[in-house]
Amino acid sequence: MSARIDLSLSRREFLKASGALVVSAAGPAFVGEALAQAAGGKPPLLPTELDSWVAIAPDGRVTAFFGKMDMGQSLDIAIAQIVADELDVDVAKVEVVMGDTALTCNQGGASGSTGIQTGARPLRSAAAEARRLLLQSASQKFGLPLEQLRVDDGVISAVSDPAKKTSYAELIGGRHFHHQVEWNKQIGNPMDIKVQAKPKSPSEYRVVGKSLPRRDVAGKVYRTDKYVTDISLPKMLHARVIRCSRAACTVGAVDEGSIRAVKGARVVREKDFVAVVADHEWDAVRASRMLKISWNETKKDPFPPMAELYDHIRKAPVVKREDPVKKGDLEGAFKTAAKIVEAEYEWPFQSHASMGPACAVADVRADGVTVWTGSQKPHFVQTGVARLLDVPPEKVRAIWVTGPGSYGRNDAGDAALDAALLSKLTGRPVRVQGMRNDGIAWDPKGPASVHRGRAALDASGKVIAYEFVSKGFSRRNIDTNESDPRDSLAGMSIGLPPKPSIDFGVPAEAYGFDNKLLAWEVIPPLLDANSPLRSSHLRDPVGPQIQFGSEQFIDELAVAAGEDPVAFRLRYVTAPRDAAVIKAAAEKAGWQPRQAPRAARSGDIVSGRGIAYAQRNGTLVAVVAEIEVERKSGRIWGRKFTVAHDCGLIVNPQGLRDTIEGNVVQGLSRTLFEEVRFDREKVTSVDWMSYPILEIRDAPEAIEVVLINRPEIAPTGAGEPSIRVIPAAVANAFFDATGVRLRRVPLTPERVRTALARA
């Protein structure tokens, strides 16, 4: 089981309570150290200390300290499997502590599908090093060389005499290793350590590669585990932060008397940051609705008309451009072309639309600050809160508690900093809870963008030039974590200047066109600060929108060349692993080659198939989408998806399948339904009616997954890669079914009916 801890415990208190810390002088001397040193107390929480990564209790149970957390991908059991294999213990004996700044090192939180790819590396090394030290201790105890010892479930015995044995619990249980490891001096995702021990080869794994069940299901189903909304402290105030319904506003007058009827409710204000607090949550809700504020408009019509969004993007000045892929003589090839194919694709702003709006609890005291947060990056919450309150980071403890989901930078980080500021201003613990309109209207958004494809074909149909350029709002107009309060609504409201980052991305693929340009362009934000359309990371940042354009454009080129879409991809893809996932998806789906769409014209319901493929940080994925289109209603149903997935070594196959299925469902929702709506002044998508998401009737009938296991290749992540291919595959399947291209997401019934009527 993952460790369920008393949220008030310090690291030392946690270790005492779990039995992993005692200061006993009994037992054999540990390798290279006097026992008095081993009894000297817990070393500081530093990446250079082996004790920061692993602990062994008196009963032999193992605790692994993981500086990331599980956002639904069953990471805890996967980490337990890795540690269990390296230590040679039963996986049931391994507990995983996640996302608490007092107990774990800063490994970057949930980020970039790196939970296994980078997050597991220090844990694997630490477990291997702990095993090496324990074997050395047993070697000294028995007077036997290491090669004459074996380990079975935490018990070390002599190969020649199994009766001669000792256990991890006897050697170190309840004490500390006090052993230094080498750290690469990087925090966040790149954090790693180097040890003397050599981790095991895949051929030696016992539990890595097995489909062990995830550990959080019972707690969620039976409601025995706490969510962040359940955190309650003595004398805690409930708060609602009040933001103007329109963008580009500052606070004028606040009529505190307007909430006099709500007993105990009061206004808290710091410049343009306004909230109401009360002893009871419903009183805070009532007061927030009753409070009268006069707002000063700082800009008339801060947003373009929604209908003109993509024209705005096309016409807006470019603040930054990069050409990550540029080879050959592109323009020279275009001059010799027998045929030129061009197309544009459009992607809207999208919300995280988490199941529930954000919640956080903060307790700011003279002796320290504690924040309970659903943010996927609690270590960066610690830094951001410290900067906001002007206190040393070591005085702040951030504790991750399961929230309503995230997948990027949603409203959870803002709630954490809101709560910290309010606790400081009121002198009491404060619980901030957003309302549904807060969660959808004010969360950071996935950026809107336009994607332009242009290609040249010679007389034989060969692609001789390929150009793909994306233009849109920055993927990080506000940054991807909460470490800088300038990136938070609270920070902006109290006057901190914004700190935008400017970047986007290009298609990730291995098409070997002789003359090729992949580029991106970023335009200015619609507002510099306090914008409900500020952009930031949403699951697989800009991957779905880029690949929606590029993989649909590849299909358009196949049609122009008169080739089957699968064969066309295999003709140009240059990497064997990439070709393998395309073939695997097509074969599993029973792909039937075609040079033109089926485009059945008769009957109300028509069906089609489409394929898309992509890379993501070393992971390769291809999907075949099978859809049905109701011509009269315009409804698209993604009936079946076949996904081929290669992420190197597979740690837990069932956990990987579950993760891929989640990607498919969320990707289908973003393809068919999700679009932030706005007018000239504000976001108008504030609930599930105005921001619909996929419901159970629209879920796929089947999702088939082909897992390509490559034990010789380090794992490369699965939390995001398979979402990026879903939109293009669905759009390509729509073309196959109808002979009509849909180049703007979402593929709503209205757009389907309009497109079919024009065909």
Image: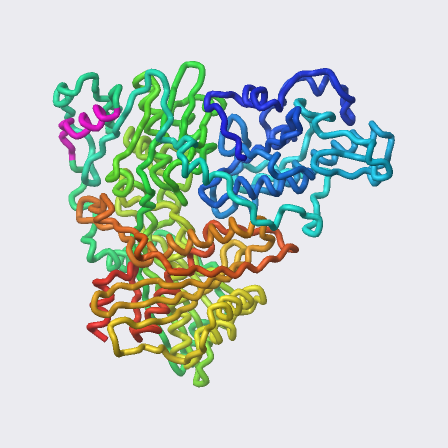
Query: Residue 464: where, in percent of width, then height?
Result: 46, 76
Position of the C terminus, as image quadrant, is bottom left
Q: Residue furthest top?
A: 366
Which residue sits at x=34%, y=58%? 471
Is residue 722 highlighted in magenta?
no
Horizontal and vertical percent position of residue 186: 57, 37
Tell which residue pokes out farthest to the bottom in this image.
459
Q: Is residue 426 above or below residue 620?
A: above
Query: Is residue 49 in view from this perspective?
Result: no
Number of marks drawn: 0
Is 287 colored magenta in this rendering? yes
Residue 706 in view:
yes
- Tell whether 227 sits left or right of 690: right
Q: Which residue is depicted at the point 31% across and 50% down?
A: 350
Region rendered in magenta: 281-296
- Along the viewing direction, whichever of 118 and 342 lies nearer the viewer: 118
x, y percentage for residue 484? Answer: 40, 33
Percent coordinates x, y for residue 34 in the rendering:
77, 19
The majority secondary structure of the magenta stretch comes to helix
From this view, report whether residue 426 is shown above or below residue 530: above
